[in-house]
Amino acid sequence: MPLRLIFMGTPDFAVPTLLELAAHGHDIAAVYTRAPKPAGRGMKMQATPVEHEARRLGIPVLTPRTLKTPEAEAEFRAHNADAAVVVAYGMILPQAILDAVPLGCFNLHASLLPRWRGAAPINRAIMAGDRETGVMVMKMDAGLDTGDVAMAERFPISDEMTAHDLHDALAPLGADLMARAMAALSRGGLQLTKQSEHGVTYAAKIDKQEARIDWRKPAHEVLRHIHGLSPFPGAWFEIEIDGAPVRIKVLRCEIAKGAGRPGELLDGQLTFACGEGAIRILELQRAGKQPMKATDFLRGTPLQPPAHVM
């Protein structure tokens, strides 16, 4: 039996779940998303990816600045929804909102809770060297990702995966999981399990200050740092090109053979020494330029030893 739902989400990651719920026949009473923001060269107001899809589907869209007022609560209740589905909405739901739908609010989270509660679970899982992550459907409470878990799907993380790759793998996996959870909820068969108090970690929001590559670390840690920040904000280093320092973001790399002083260029193929071992850059972005393959970069900028990062 279809449910009447409120959907709350903002970025690309949330779009597959909205589409999946609609495809399963649920009545999406309203979509809540963040307000449009200026973006691009012209700084024109840009609606969120979720708003674009909601309007295409003909679903009413709301972009409240806050949910903490009596008016916001009354508006939320007026949708007469059975439950709410939340996917990367970007705004804290106060208790009054959590209590405003009879079956509760259910969040899709991109980690295996209680590991990586918080804002950046995909990035942090890669950066920490985790070999596995996943998606979970959780019934929300007032804490930060502390609610009871309903369903989970695991997913392996390879060293080749960037944050972009993992994002694109988990988004449809999570959409399917939420659709199955809402189907079980509609039948009265959704089972909830309390989260463990062991193994709690927090996925702090990515700070641009941590994006500079520390070549003193072992090669595997450098690789995971690079891939966990790719494509945004992008791990970077500076090197001298034609007598001037140039910032280069590294978007993809691999473990390579070689050793040397940390940050030393070891060959003409963008292999750099780390504290232990070395990495070879495969994709990069020079400041002010478009992303490119390392081979294309080297055609125009043939870097050779004894170059060293600055």
Image (cartoon, grey):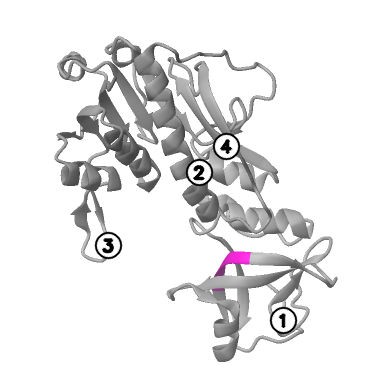
**N-terminal of the two: label 4 or label 1?**
4
User: Which kind of residue does numbered mark 1 sit on?
Assistant: Ala
Q: What stretch is highlighted in magenta?
A: 247-252
Q: Residue 265's x, y, as percent?
A: 74, 77
Q: Residue 199's x, y, as percent?
A: 69, 25
User: Which kind of residue does numbered mark 3 sit on?
Assistant: Gly
Q: To which residue does mark 4 refer? A: 134
Provide the secondary structure element on which disc 4 rests.
strand
Vertical relation: 138 (above or below) 154: above
Q: Which of label 3 and label 4 is nearer to you?
A: 4
Residue 299, located in which quarter of the rendered image?
Answer: bottom right
Q: To which residue does mark 1 refer? A: 307
**N-terminal of the two: label 2 or label 4?**
4
Q: To which residue does mark 3 refer? A: 40
Q: To which residue does mark 2 refer? A: 170
- Rounded to the nearest whole Å, what is the CA distance between mark 3 and mark 2? 27 Å
Provide the secondary structure element on which disc 1 rests.
loop
The numbered dot on residue 25 is: none
